[in-house]
Image (cartoon, rainbow, N blue to C red):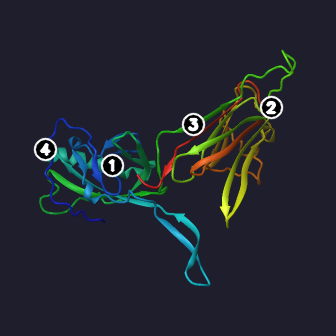
């Protein structure tokens, strides 16, 4: 278990105050909170709560750890073949106190339950908030550390624990979702008042910006009418000094699952991680994708050239793309 090296802490007076940004290693001034699997929020940097963070012992908030796969180079050294992000461990020391022994024990037990229940009820969320309003959070599971100091004088009206939180996804996410909406405009008659053409295929070519540090895997909601749905991303890269353009796409055909064309107002949702396709009644439409060529692609950091194509579109046809940016650090 990680050891706390901070000196004995005098519990702060209760009343007043509130969450105040404190200096945290690797990230600077911020406030922190923990949301347990039941949805209850536990402030971690509010001294009036009956517990607070020993900031000097916090670790694991920096860049994601990676495992590197390399190939030996015949002329010496090695070349990187692949970088695999690894699960992250965060150490978070807490100091818990009370005016009486019973008050201290009640707080200690409640906090222990809030963290350990992540092993039974699913992950909790550790959230870091900046003074400017920016927030980043990460899903956590309790691993170890809620045992107390075990030293003389502790465990009566106060004690400290160095909690280790295990994160299966090492990246931090912005809890504020980004959305992109595209909708078919009003269609025109070919002859009234003059010869006109309205597209029934291409809903929109657009640039979707991912402000994060790493690839995100978006969710798509398509609203009919539509007979065939195709989403394509075009990527440009420089390989050995040469510009290389590649495309990835997937197509969804409602007739492949015996439904027929999407009618006005009918919706289907496509998730890219984990892969899933659901009609509005919850039925599984994953068989409507053009396997095996379908690629449920992600959005790389920066600008992404994206095409939303709905064959058979009409008034009300729409595409909504949503994602949460992901970051290396808190």
Local crowd at mark 4 within 10 Å, few (<14), some, or many (≥20)? few
The residue wearing badge 4 is 99
Local crowd at mark 1 within 10 Å, few (<14), some, or many (≥20)? few
Between the C-alphas of marks 3 and 1, the distance is 36 Å
Assess whether mark 4 and mark 1 are in contact (beta carbons under 8 angstroms).
no
Judged from the image, the secondary structure of the residue bearing numbered disc 3 is: strand
The residue wearing badge 1 is 113
Residue 247, position as x, y percentages in the image: 73, 52
Residue visible at 60% across and 47% down? 303
Q: Nearer the viewer, mark 1 or mark 2?
A: 2
Local crowd at mark 2 within 10 Å, few (<14), some, or many (≥20)? some
Q: Nearer the viewer, mark 4 or mark 3?
A: 3
Residue visible at 24% across and 54% down? 54
Judge from the rendering whether residue 250 lies leftward or rightward of residue 87; answer left or right.
right
Going from N to C along the chain, the mark reached first, 3 or 2, is 3
Q: Going by the picture, which residue comes out furthest to the bottom?
A: 75
Between the C-alphas of marks 2 and 4, the distance is 69 Å
The residue wearing badge 3 is 179
Query: Which label was assigned to residue 312?
Result: 2
Residue visible at 36% across and 52% down? 116
Between the C-alphas of marks 1 and 4, the distance is 21 Å
Judge from the rendering whether residue 156 lies leftward or rightward of residue 200; answer left or right.
left
Going from N to C along the chain, the mark reached first, 1 or 2, is 1
Q: Nearer the viewer, mark 3 or mark 1?
A: 3
Between the C-alphas of marks 3 and 2, the distance is 24 Å
Going from N to C along the chain, the mark reached first, 3 or 1, is 1
The front one of 269 and 326 is: 326
Judged from the image, the secondary structure of the residue bearing numbered disc 2 is: loop
The front one of 300 and 146 is: 300
Local crowd at mark 3 within 10 Å, few (<14), some, or many (≥20)? some
């Amino acid at each position: 278990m990680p050891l706390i090296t901070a000196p004995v802490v005098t519990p702060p007076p209760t009343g007043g105050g509130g969450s105040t940004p404190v200096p945290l290693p690797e990230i600077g001034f911020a406030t922190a909170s923990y949301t347990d699997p039941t949805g209850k929020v536990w402030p971690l940097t509010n001294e009036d709560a009956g517990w607070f963070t020993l900031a000097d012992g916090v670790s694991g908030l920096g860049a994601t750890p990676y495992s590197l796969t390399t190939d030996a180079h015949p002329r010496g050294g090695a070349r990187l073949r692949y970088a695999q992000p690894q699960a992250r461990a965060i150490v978070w020391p807490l100091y818990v106190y009370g005016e009486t022994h019973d008050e201290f024990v009640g707080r200690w037990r409640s906090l222990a339950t809030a963290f350990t229940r992540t092993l039974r009820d699913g992950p909790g969320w550790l959230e870091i908030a900046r003074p400017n309003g920016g927030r980043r959070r990460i899903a956590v599971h309790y691993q170890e550390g809620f045992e107390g100091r075990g030293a003389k004088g502790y465990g009566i009206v106060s004690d400290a624990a160095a909690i280790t939180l295990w994160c299966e996804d090492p990246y931090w996410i912005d809890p504020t979702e980004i959305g992109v909406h595209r909708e078919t405009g009003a269609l025109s008659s070919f002859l009234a008042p003059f010869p006109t053409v309205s597209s029934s295929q291409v809903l929109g070519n657009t640039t979707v910006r991912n402000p994060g540090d790493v690839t995100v895997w978006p969710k798509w909601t398509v609203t009919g009418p539509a007979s065939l749905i195709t989403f394509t991303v075009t990527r440009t890269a420089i390989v050995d000094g040469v510009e290389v353009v590649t495309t990835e796409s997937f197509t969804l055909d409602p007739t492949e699952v015996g439904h027929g064309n999407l009618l006005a107002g009918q919706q289907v949702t496509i998730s890219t991680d984990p892969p899933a396709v659901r009609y509005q009644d919850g039925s599984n439409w994953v068989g409507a994708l053009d396997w095996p060529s379908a690629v449920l692609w992600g959005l790389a950091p920066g600008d992404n050239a994206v095409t939303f194509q709905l064959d058979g579109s009409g008034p009300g046809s729409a595409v909504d793309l949503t994602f949460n940016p992901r970051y290396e650090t808190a």
